[in-house]
Image: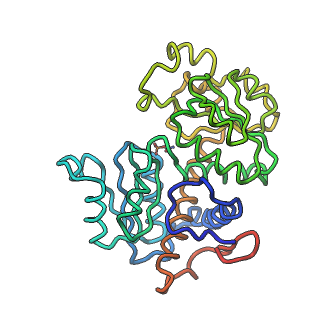
């Protein structure tokens, strides 16, 4: 089975075999970034618009580099440089962008559901680069690729996701992806940041960090989303750090081959101790590297599919571009 969606709005409901197909494609793209000349003509003549209404270091940059490595033209639009500052709605902005015939729009927006709205107003593929508290699918995909590289498979692993689950789009997308791939998931955090409805996802809920991390194969720390918190969910940052900061002592409770993940940006000393973030179990920089390959894969899969009636220079893309089950990705 190949990934056949028109847009990438989220990972809720995406079957595990589709996620594996994306990861296989991303894995096949990694080699391009190790070449002397890091470019293939796969998306030559295509245009990717990066429309970012929120700050971003990793996601925006890696989407831009990913598009360029595939020879697509890229346009970057930020909230401050768009006509949103003059009162234009997202739908109107999208219609105007579409009139210039882009081949994909990558959207980051503070409102949950903004990408679905955009997808109803434009004809080209929409890629969710993080919408409010809803989803951040490419982050979860790069996280899954990183776990798979280290452990070979995700099925059967115990993955502890720690922190501000209530507001984290990264946490939400990872729950959907990791469940689809057969992981056993523990969500860990203060009860105020662990909505009980997460229980419906068939995951364990823990309010003690030690209980969540004990014997885990993967520990994924989340950023405290202070910009999205409308109330005091814990007494103070100092108290949060006292109970939920991942220290070397807590890491020792996990399996000896544990990997430590964080999507960034890091709040050192609040969510994760520097000794852990920069320590031997950390794969945080590998996550960033894999983000590039995952975004190349998503651009390739969505633009190639939406332009399937045209000739894309897919021969220039790296082999195999096949799913594990053998079909074309
Ligand atoms: N992980 C992530 O989304 O980082 P940015 O906000 O820098 O894009």
Most foreground residue, 203 or 1? 203
Q: Residue furthest left?
A: 86
Side (left or right) of 27 relative to 100 = right
Q: Position of residue 214 (x, y in %)?
A: 79, 28
Q: Relative to 150, does residue 99 appear above or below in the rendering?
A: below
Q: Position of residue 237 (x, y in %)?
A: 51, 17
Measuring 35% from the left and 64% from the top, which residue is drawn there? 121
Side (left or right) of 78 relative to 324 = left
**Quadrant into which the C terminus falls:** bottom right
Q: Position of residue 240 (x, y in %)?
A: 57, 18
Q: Give the quarter of the image for residue 253.
A: top right
Side (left or right) of 280 relative to 296 = right
Q: Relative to 224, does residue 314 appear above or below in the rendering?
A: below
Most foreground residue, 161 or 241? 161
Measuring 56% from the left and 62% from the top, which residue is drawn there? 33
Q: Position of residue 15 (x, y in %)?
A: 68, 60
């Amino acid at each position: 089975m190949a990934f056949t969606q028109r847009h990438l709005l989220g990972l809720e409901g995406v079957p595990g075999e589709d996620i594996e197909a994306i990861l296989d494609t991303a894995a096949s793209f990694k080699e391009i970034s190790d070449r002397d000349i890091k470019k293939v003509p796969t998306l030559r003549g295509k245009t990717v618009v990066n429309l970012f209404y929120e700050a971003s270091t990793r996601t925006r940059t890696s989407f831009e580099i990913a598009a360029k490595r595939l020879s697509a033209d890229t346009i970057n639009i930020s909230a401050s440089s768009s006509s949103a500052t003059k009162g234009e709605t997202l739908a109107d902005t999208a219609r105007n962008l579409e009139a210039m015939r882009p081949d994909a729009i990558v959207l980051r927006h503070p409102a949950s559901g903004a990408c679905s709205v955009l997808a109803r107003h434009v004809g080209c593929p929409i890629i969710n680069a993080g919408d409010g508290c809803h989803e951040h699918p490419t982050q979860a995909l790069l996280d899954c690729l990183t776990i798979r590289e280290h452990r070979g498979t995700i099925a059967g692993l115990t993955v502890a996701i720690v922190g501000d689950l209530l507001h984290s789009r990264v946490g939400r997308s990872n729950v959907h992806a990791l469940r689809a791939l057969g992981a056993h998931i523990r969500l860990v955090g203060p009860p105020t940041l662990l909505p009980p409805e997460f229980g419906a996802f068939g995951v364990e809920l823990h309010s003690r960090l030690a209980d969540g991390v004990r014997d885990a194969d993967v520990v994924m720390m989340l950023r405290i989303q202070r910009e999205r918190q409308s109330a005091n969910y814990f007494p103070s940052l100092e108290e949060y750090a006292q109970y939920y900061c991942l220290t070397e002592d807590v890491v020792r409770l996990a399996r000896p081959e544990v990997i430590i993940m964080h999507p960034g940006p890091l709040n050192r000393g609040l969510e994760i101790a520097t000794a852990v973030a920069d320590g031997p179990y950390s794969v945080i920089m590998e996550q960033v590297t894999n983000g590039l390959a995952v975004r190349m894969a998503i651009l390739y899969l969505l633009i190639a599919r939406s332009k399937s009636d045209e000739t894309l220079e897919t021969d220039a893309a790296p082999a195999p571009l096949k799913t594990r089950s053998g079909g074309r990705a």
